[in-house]
C-alpha cells in the first residue's frame, strides 16, 4: 500500500478496541447515529442535486408537504435519538459507584498523571499542596502526619483488575486537565479545587493510553500514562509487590 | 437644511486625510471592516498552515519564519478567525455596506457610535498582535482561556503580559461589537422606510437583527468575565482560582481570599461563546436564503417560518452553553437538560435546510458565482450540522469531546459555511462595495470565480471530512506533535500520522485556492468594467439606484417606499420581476 493511503484501514473501522463494560452500548449508539447522519447527508444532497437537475416548474409545492411534514418526521427522529441517549446516560451517570468498587485517586498536574491506591486500610491519607515534592517521591503531597497515608501507594501507571468496578476520584493540582481513555470510551476533566468521581468496569486485559484532553500548557501533548488492565490474580500480585517495595523504602 | 454630521453613503468629495479617516460614512466603515477582516484572514490562514506543516513535517524550521510555538499559534488562529474574521466581516462589514440600503434609508441611526465601534475593533486587533510581541510571546490557553491556566502567570510562557494583552484585546473587541450591535438594532427599529414592515424585511436583515441581539447579551457577559479574570490576575481576588492551587511550584489562592471555581469561568465564557458562534453564522444563513430565491427567481419558501426559525435559533443559542461542559464536572441532571436543549436546535436548523431545498427544487437556477457559494453554504451547513446532534449526546461526547471530530464539526458548520457566506456576499455585492458617486462598480470575474468556488469547495471537504475519522480514532485537539510521544499514547498517535499528512496536503490546496480570489480581486479592481444598475435582477433595496453609495439626494424626488415582500418573480421562468421599491401604479402604467 502506498504510504499516502496507509490510513485506509481507518476508513473501515476507525474506533479503537473496546475495554469497558459500558463501551459496546456507546459504540452501538455512535454507529447508529453515524449511520443516520450519513443517510440524511446523502438524502439531503440527493434532493439538492435532483432539484437542481430537474426541469423547472413555475410553482413550488405546498408548505405542508415540503416543510412541515418532513420537519415533523425529523423531529420525531431527533427526539428518539435523544431519548435513547438519555437512557444510556442515566444508566451510567445518575447512580453512584458500586459500594464494592475499587478506589483509586487520579491526580493530574503539568504534565503527568499520578495514581494513588489507598492501601490495606482502604482510606486515603490527607494531602497538602505545600508538601508536594515530585523530586522527593511525593508528587501528590502526602502528609506524613496522617497515619492513613502511610500505606498509600502512588504510581505513575494505572493498573486495574479486569471485571471489577472501579471508582476513580479525579483531582487536579494546578490547572484543568482532561482524563481520557479512548478504549474505555471515557473522558472527564479533572478540575483544581474539586474531586470528581467517575465509575466504570474495565473488561478486556491489555495496555491502553491515558491521555490529557484539556489544553493544560506547553507539555499537553506528552501528558499521558499507561493503563494496564490485567487478570485479577495478576493484579493482586502486582499490588502486593509494589506495596512490599514501598514498605521497604520507608523502613530501611 | 441644517448641515448634518452624517454624510451620505459613499461621498467621495476630496477632503483632508484626517477628515476622511474620521469618517462616519457607513459605506466607508463597511469597507474598512472588510479590509480588517481580509488582513485577519490572511494572518489566521498562515497560522493554520503553520500548525498543519508543524504536525506533518516537524523538522521544518518554521520558527525562523514565524516566531512562537504551536499552542500560541492555535490561540491566535482561533481568536483572530472567530472574532476578527467571522464576526466582523458578515455582521459589521456587510452590515454597514448593505443594511441601511436594504431598509430603504441612507443613514445609520447612530453613525458616531458606529464609527467608534470600528476604531475600537481595529485597536483590539492591534492589541491582539501586540500580545505575541511580548518577551514570552502570545498566550497558549486557546480562545477559551480556561483558568487557572489563564489566571496564573506561572502556568506557562505567554501567560504573563501576553495573556493580559489578549484579555484586553477581547474586551476591546466586545466593546466595539456592543456599540456596533446597538447601532444595528436602532437602525433596524427606526430606519425602515415607508412600507418596510417586519414581514417584508429581507432575511439578511433578520439575520443581522438576531445576531445584534445576541451580541448585546453575549458580549456583556464576556466583559464581566474578563473583568473578574483580570481582578484574579492583578488584584488578589479568587473568582476562578481555588484555594491551594499549586502551579509550577507557586502556591495560589492560599492568602485567605476565598475559594474560587474554574467552572464559573466556563459558565460565563460559554454563555458568551455559544451565542458568539451563532453571531458568526446567522447573517450567512439570511444571505443564503435571499440568494437562493434571487437566482431561483422565486419567493423565499416559507418566509414566515424562516423568520421564526432565525429568532428561535437565536433564543435556543443562549440556552445551550452547557453542552461545551459535558465533561467539565457538571451535575448529570444539568447535562441532560443541556443535551435536550441542544438537540432541539436541530429542529429550526432542519426547517431552514428544508426551506432552502424547497426554494431551489425544480427551479433551474442561474449558476452565478454567488449562487454557487450559497449552494456550497447549504451543503456545508448540512454536513457540519448533522454531527451536531451526535455531539449533543453526553454519552457520545464523553468519547468525542476535544477530539478532531469536534474540530471537523465546527470548522465545517461555522468556519467553512461562514466563509462561504462571506464569499457569496463579496461576489454578490462587489458592485456595491466598489460603487462611487451613485454608480455601481465592477462585478468580479465570473469564470475565475467559478474556479475559485470549485477549488474551495473541494478543498474544504478534503480538509475537514477526514478529521471526523481522526476524531473517531481518538486523536485529541491541541497536540503540538504526533511523533515522539512517550508510552502507549505514542502508538495511538503514530497510527494517525498518515491521515494527518493527507489533511495537511488538502489544507495547503485549500489555502492555495484562495490565491484565485485574490487574483480576481486585483484584476477586477484594475480592469473591471462597471456593472449594470441591477446586475442580478435583484428585488431588494440595496440595488435601488437612489440608494447606491454616493447617489445624490435629489430634493423633490419621490421618497423611497416599499410595496411588497422581496423576491417577487413572475412568469414561468421568473423572467419578469418586481423590485420591492416599484409601486403597483408604475407597474400598471408600464403595462398600459
Image (spheres, coloured by chain):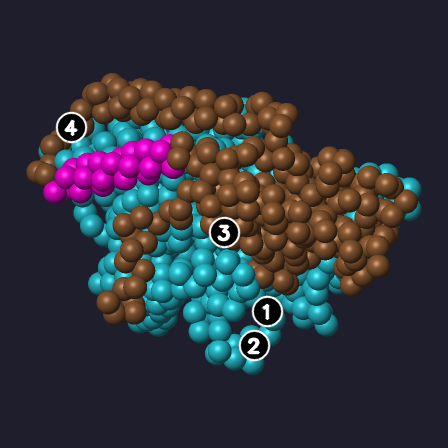
Chain colours: A brown, B cyan
Q: Which residue is mark 4?
A: A59
The residue labelled by disc 1 is B69
* Residues tagged by mark 1 and mark 3 found on one chain of the structure: no
Element under label 3? Answer: strand
Instruction: Choose the circle earlier in sequence order: 4 or 3.
Output: 4
Query: Label 4, label 2: how many angstroms apart (C-alpha)?
Result: 59 Å
How packed mark 1 is, by other alpha carbons closer than 10 Å (few <14, some 14-19, many 20 or more), is: some
Give the magenta-colored segment's residue range.
A27-53
Checking the image for residue A208, the label placed there is: 3
Which residue carries the number 2 mark?
B63
For image coordinates 44% across by 73% down, the residue present is B57
Secondary structure type for disc 2 = helix
Q: Quadrant of the N terminus of chain B?
A: top right
B163 is higher (above) or lower (below) than B211: below
Marks 4 and 3, Cα distance to the nearest angstrom?
60 Å
Rendering coords of residue B496 (x, y %): 40, 60
Residue A43 on the magenta segment: yes
- Kindly check if marks 4 and 3 are in contact, taking CB atoms under 8 A apart as contact: no
Amino acid at each position: 500500500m502506498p504510504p499516502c493511503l496507509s490510513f485506509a484501514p481507518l476508513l473501515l473501522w476507525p474506533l479503537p478496541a473496546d475495554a469497558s463494560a459500558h463501551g459496546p452500548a456507546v459504540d452501538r449508539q455512535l454507529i447508529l447515529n453515524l449511520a443516520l447522519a450519513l443517510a440524511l447527508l446523502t438524502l439531503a444532497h440527493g434532493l439538492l442535486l435532483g432539484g437542481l437537475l430537474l426541469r423547472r416548474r413555475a410553482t413550488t409545492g405546498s408548505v405542508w408537504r415540503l416543510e412541515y411534514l418532513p420537519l415533523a418526521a425529523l423531529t420525531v427522529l431527533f427526539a428518539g435519538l435523544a431519548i435513547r441517549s438519555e437512557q444510556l446516560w442515566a444508566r451510567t451517570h445518575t447512580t453512584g459507584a458500586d459500594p464494592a468498587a475499587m478506589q483509586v485517586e487520579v491526580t493530574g498536574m503539568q504534565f503527568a498523571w499520578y495514581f494513588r491506591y489507598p492501601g490495606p486500610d482502604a482510606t486515603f491519607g490527607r494531602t497538602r499542596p505545600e508538601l508536594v515534592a515530585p523530586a522527593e517521591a511525593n508528587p501528590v503531597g502526602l502528609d506524613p502526619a496522617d497515619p492513613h497515608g502511610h500505606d498509600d501507594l502512588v504510581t505513575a501507571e494505572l493498573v486495574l483488575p479486569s471485571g471489577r468496578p472501579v471508582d476513580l476520584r479525579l483531582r487536579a493540582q494546578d490547572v484543568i486537565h482532561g482524563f481520557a481513555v479512548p478504549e474505555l470510551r471515557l473522558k472527564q476533566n479533572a478540575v483544581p479545587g474539586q474531586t470528581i468521581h467517575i465509575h466504570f468496569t474495565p473488561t478486556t486485559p491489555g495496555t491502553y493510553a491515558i491521555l490529557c484532553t484539556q489544553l493544560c500548557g506547553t507539555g499537553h501533548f506528552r501528558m499521558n500514562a499507561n493503563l494496564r488492565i490485567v487478570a485479577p490474580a495478576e493484579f493482586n500480585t502486582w499490588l502486593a509487590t509494589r506495596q512490599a517495595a514501598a514498605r521497604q523504602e520507608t523502613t530501611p | 437644511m441644517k448641515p448634518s454630521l452624517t454624510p451620505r453613503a459613499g461621498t467621495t468629495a476630496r477632503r483632508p486625510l484626517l477628515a476622511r479617516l474620521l469618517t462616519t460614512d457607513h459605506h466607508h466603515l463597511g469597507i474598512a471592516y472588510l479590509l480588517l477582516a481580509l488582513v485577519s484572514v490572511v494572518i489566521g490562514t498562515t497560522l493554520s498552515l503553520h500548525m498543519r506543516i508543524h504536525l506533518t513535517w516537524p523538522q521544518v524550521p518554521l520558527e525562523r519564519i514565524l516566531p512562537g510555538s504551536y499552542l500560541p499559534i492555535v490561540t491566535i488562529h482561533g481568536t483572530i478567525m472567530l472574532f476578527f474574521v467571522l464576526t466582523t466581516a458578515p455582521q459589521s462589514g456587510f452590515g454597514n455596506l448593505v443594511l441601511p440600503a436594504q431598509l430603504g434609508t441612507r443613514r445609520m441611526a447612530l453613525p458616531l457610535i458606529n464609527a467608534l465601534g470600528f476604531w475600537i475593533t481595529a485597536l483590539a486587533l492591534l492589541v491582539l498582535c501586540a500580545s505575541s510581541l511580548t518577551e514570552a510571546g502570545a498566550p497558549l490557553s486557546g480562545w477559551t482561556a480556561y483558568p487557572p491556566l489563564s489566571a496564573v502567570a506561572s502556568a506557562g510562557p505567554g501567560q504573563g503580559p501576553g495573556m493580559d494583552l489578549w484579555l484586553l484585546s477581547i474586551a476591546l473587541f466586545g466593546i466595539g461589537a456592543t456599540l456596533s450591535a446597538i447601532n444595528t438594532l436602532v437602525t433596524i427599529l427606526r430606519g425602515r422606510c415607508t412600507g418596510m414592515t417586519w414581514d417584508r424585511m429581507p432575511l439578511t436583515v433578520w439575520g443581522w437583527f438576531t445576531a445584534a441581539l445576541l451580541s448585546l447579551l453575549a458580549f456583556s457577559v464576556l466583559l464581566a468575565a474578563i473583568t473578574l479574570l483580570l481582578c484574579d490576575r492583578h488584584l488578589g481576588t479568587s473568582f476562578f482560582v481555588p484555594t491551594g492551587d499549586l502551579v509550577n511550584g507557586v502556591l495560589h489562592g492560599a492568602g485567605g481570599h476565598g475559594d474560587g471555581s474554574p467552572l464559573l469561568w466556563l459558565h460565563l465564557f460559554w454563555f458568551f461563546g455559544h451565542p458568539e458562534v451563532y453571531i458568526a453564522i446567522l447573517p450567512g444563513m439570511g444571505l443564503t436564503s435571499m440568494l437562493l430565491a434571487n437566482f431561483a427567481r422565486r419567493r423565499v419558501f416559507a418566509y414566515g417560518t424562516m423568520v421564526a426559525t432565525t429568532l428561535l435559533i437565536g433564543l435556543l443559542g443562549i440556552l445551550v452553553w452547557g453542552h461545551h461542559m459535558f465533561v467539565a464536572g457538571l451535575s448529570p441532571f444539568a447535562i441532560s437538560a443541556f443535551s435536550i436543549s441542544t438537540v432541539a436546535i436541530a429542529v429550526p436548523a432542519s426547517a431552514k435546510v428544508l426551506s432552502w431545498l424547497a426554494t431551489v427544487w425544480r427551479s433551474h437556477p442561474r449558476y452565478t458565482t454567488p449562487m454557487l457559494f450559497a449552494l456550497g453554504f447549504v451543503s456545508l451547513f448540512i454536513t457540519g450540522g448533522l454531527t451536531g446532534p451526535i455531539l449533543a449526546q453526553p454519552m457520545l461526547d464523553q468519547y468525542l469531546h476535544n477530539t478532531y471530530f469536534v474540530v471537523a464539526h465546527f470548522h465545517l458548520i461555522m468556519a467553512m459555511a461562514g466563509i462561504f457566506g462571506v464569499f457569496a456576499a463579496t461576489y454578490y455585492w462587489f458592485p456595491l462595495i466598489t460603487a462611487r458617486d451613485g454608480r455601481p462598480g465592477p462585478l468580479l470575474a465570473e469564470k475565475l470565480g467559478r474556479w475559485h468556488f470549485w477549488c474551495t469547495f473541494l478543498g474544504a471537504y478534503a480538509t475537514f471530512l477526514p478529521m471526523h475519522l481522526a476524531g473517531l480514532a481518538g486523536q485529541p485537539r491541541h497536540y503540538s506533535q504526533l511523533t515522539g510521544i512517550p508510552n502507549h499514547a505514542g502508538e495511538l498517535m503514530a497510527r494517525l500520522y498518515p491521515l494527518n499528512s493527507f489533511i495537511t496536503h488538502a489544507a495547503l490546496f485549500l489555502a492555495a485556492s484562495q490565491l484565485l480570489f485574490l487574483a480576481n480581486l486585483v484584476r477586477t479592481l484594475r480592469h473591471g468594467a462597471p456593472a449594470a444598475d441591477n446586475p442580478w435582477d435583484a428585488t431588494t433595496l440595496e440595488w435601488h439606484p437612489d440608494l447606491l453609495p454616493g447617489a445624490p439626494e435629489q430634493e423633490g424626488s419621490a421618497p423611497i417606499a416599499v410595496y411588497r415582500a422581496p423576491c417577487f418573480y413572475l412568469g414561468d421562468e421568473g423572467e419578469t420581476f418586481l423590485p420591492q421599491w416599484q409601486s403597483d401604479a408604475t407597474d400598471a402604467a408600464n403595462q398600459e
